Image: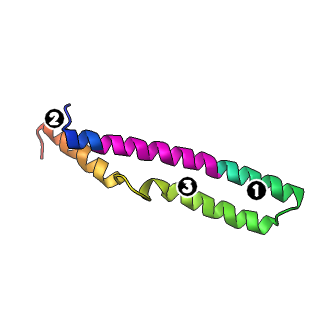
Amino acid sequence: MKFSEDELKLIGAARKKSTDARVKRLLILFAIMIGIGLMIAGIVSADRIAYAAVAAVFLSIAMPQLGGGPKYEDLVKLLESKSTDISGEP
């Protein structure tokens, strides 16, 4: 399967976006762990940590679709076009 220059750029941007999302998720997990530690120490209330943790989960789930770079749908279109090229079916 051969890719054009534009398709390779799309794949590269998707790879970078995926790596960025993975790093940001690790940072969010680290922040949640710090929050739990602060909660256990009695510095921050459990309610605030619970609200922040729920927000962090939603942010982690939505992160791949946020920001610059290709969306999931763009990559699906690319794969669909390549798969029809190979199989010959429309």
Label 3: few (<14), some or many (≥20) within 10 Å?
A: some
Which color scheme is applied? rainbow
Label 2: few (<14), some or many (≥20) within 10 Å?
A: few
User: Which residue in the rendered view is the most extreme toward the right?
Assistant: 42
Residue placed most toward the observer, 90 or 55: 55
> Which quadrant of the figure has residue 83?
top left
Q: Point out the stretch of residues depicted in magenta.
A: 10-28
Q: On residue 53, which mark appears?
A: none
Q: Secondary structure at mark 3?
A: helix
| Residue topped by disc 1 | 35
The N terminus, quarter of image? top left
Assign the magenta stretch its main secondary structure: helix
Label 1: few (<14), some or many (≥20) within 10 Å?
A: many
| Residue topped by disc 3 | 60
- The residue depicted at 29 percent of the width and 52 percent of the height is 74
Image x and y of residue 5, in percent: 20, 39
Image x and y of residue 66, in percent: 44, 59
Q: Amino acid at mark 1?
A: Gly
Image x and y of residue 77, in percent: 24, 50
How far separated are the C-alphas under marks 1 and 2?
51 Å
Left or right side of 4 for 11: right
- The residue depicted at 22 percent of the width and 43 percent of the height is 6
Left or right side of 70 for 62: right
In this picture, is 54 found above or below 29? Answer: below
| Residue topped by disc 2 | 86
Q: Amino acid at mark 3?
A: Ser
Q: Amino acid at mark 2?
A: Ile
Q: Earlier in the sequence, mark 3 or mark 1?
A: 1
